[in-house]
Image (spheres, rainbow, N blue to C red):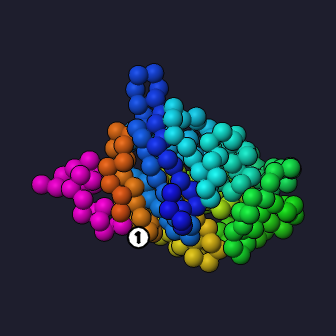
């Protein structure tokens, strides 16, 4: 783990029966950056997200947040410490309005009690642990992500691209330090994706958020990421800047297109 790594994955292996979904994966997410995680379908990207958030126990290996081993913590305890995520398949309360989807997250956050501070503290709007006013916080986040005008619209009436912004807003309601985004551009128009990119940049550079991004939109990945990891058949085959990853022959062969 490097000194500026906020989130680290150390030698994570996941096996399902005799098949390895992840094999000795190391990954470091630096504070205040967007780290990309790309690879073909079935490469193990979402499996790694599930390990990081506690939905799946690795066969071996560790997950560390700010140097602390959180591998044995339940999902909700990792969320308390500042790990939030969105999902490849939308997980929203479709019968509720946009505002109420966010307020639910705030109310859940306010039920958290008795966990240590651990010195973990974000910048600006991302300090944690104090009880928050659900209505006020929802209004703040709605404004932050540009959904104020849609606050009272039922989620069931929204197009997929807009619903993904709602899911992002809901994740922000716990005031995370690390946000895991699983294919957030899926279902978005080009215009929506560019707006989403601008929002992510603002959250990172203005509010001190740290992001780990799974995405198949390579324009988005190359534009917004500071560093990229490439998975193929459960193994990391390349790590580097967007320029280095784009030029890597193994990556082009496995994912971006043949180098020949």
Instruction: Please name the residue shown 55% across and 43% down the image.
Output: 62
Could you tell whether 19 is left or right of 251 in the image?
Answer: right
Q: Pinpoint residue 73: horizontal percent, then vertical percent.
A: 69, 41
Q: Pinpoint residue 244: horizontal percent, then vertical percent.
A: 29, 65
Question: Relative to the observer, which residue lies in front, 37 or 71?
Answer: 71
Residue 252 position by quadrant:
bottom left
The residue that label 1 is drawn on is 223
Q: Is residue 108 above or below residue 146?
A: above
Instruction: Please name the residue shown 73% across and 44% down the image.
Output: 76
Q: Pinpoint residue 88: horizontal percent, then vertical percent.
A: 53, 46
Determine whether the residue tagged by mark 1 lies in a helix, strand or loop.
helix
Question: Is residue 167 visible to the viewer in this orientation of the structure?
Answer: no
Instruction: Please name the residue shown 24% across and 63% down the image.
Output: 247
Which residue appears farthest toward the top when viewing the image? 17
Q: Pinpoint residue 204: horizontal percent, then vertical percent.
A: 58, 71
Which residue appears farthest toward the left when viewing the image? 260
Does the magenta portion include 78? no
Q: Predominant secondary structure in magenta? A: helix
Could you tell whether 25 is left or right of 86 in the image?
Answer: left
Which quadrant would the C terminus be assigned to in this image? Answer: bottom left
Could you tell whether 134 is left or right of 64 in the image?
Answer: right
The mark tally for this picture is 1
Instruction: Please name the residue shown 56% across and 70% down the image.
Output: 32
Task: Give neighbour class at mark 1: few <14, some 14-19, many 20+ (Cα, 10 Å).
Answer: few
Question: Relative to the observer, which residue lies in front, 123 or 206?
Answer: 123
Q: Which residues are magenta?
A: 241-260
Question: Is residue 34 visible to the viewer in this orientation of the structure?
Answer: yes
């Amino acid at each position: 783990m490097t000194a500026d790594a906020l989130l680290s994955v150390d030698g994570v292996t996941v096996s399902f029966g005799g098949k390895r979904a992840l094999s000795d994966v190391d990954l470091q997410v630096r504070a205040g950056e967007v780290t990309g995680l790309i690879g073909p379908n079935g490469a193990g990207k979402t499996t790694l997200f599930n390990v990081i958030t506690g939905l799946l126990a690795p066969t071996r290996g560790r997950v560390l947040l700010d140097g602390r081993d959180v591998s044995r913590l339940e999902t909700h305890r990792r969320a308390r410490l500042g790990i939030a995520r969105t999902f490849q398949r939308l997980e929203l309360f479709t019968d509720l309005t946009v505002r109420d989807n966010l307020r639910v997250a705030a109310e859940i956050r306010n039920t958290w009690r008795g966990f240590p501070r651990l010195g973990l503290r974000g910048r600006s709007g991302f300090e944690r642990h104090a009880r928050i006013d659900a209505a006020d916080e929802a209004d703040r986040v709605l404004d932050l992500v540009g959904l104020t005008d849609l606050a009272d619209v039922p989620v069931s009436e929204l197009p997929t691209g807009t619903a993904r912004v709602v899911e992002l807003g809901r994740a922000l309601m716990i005031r995370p330090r690390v946000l895991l985004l699983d294919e957030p551009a899926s279902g978005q128009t080009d215009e929506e994706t560019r707006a989403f990119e601008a929002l992510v940049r603002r959250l990172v550079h203005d509010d001190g958020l740290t992001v780990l991004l799974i995405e198949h939109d390579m324009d988005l990945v190359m534009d917004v990421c500071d560093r990229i990891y490439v998975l193929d058949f459960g193994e990391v085959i390349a790590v580097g800047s967007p320029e280095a990853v784009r030029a890597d022959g193994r990556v082009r062969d496995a994912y971006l297109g043949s180098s020949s």
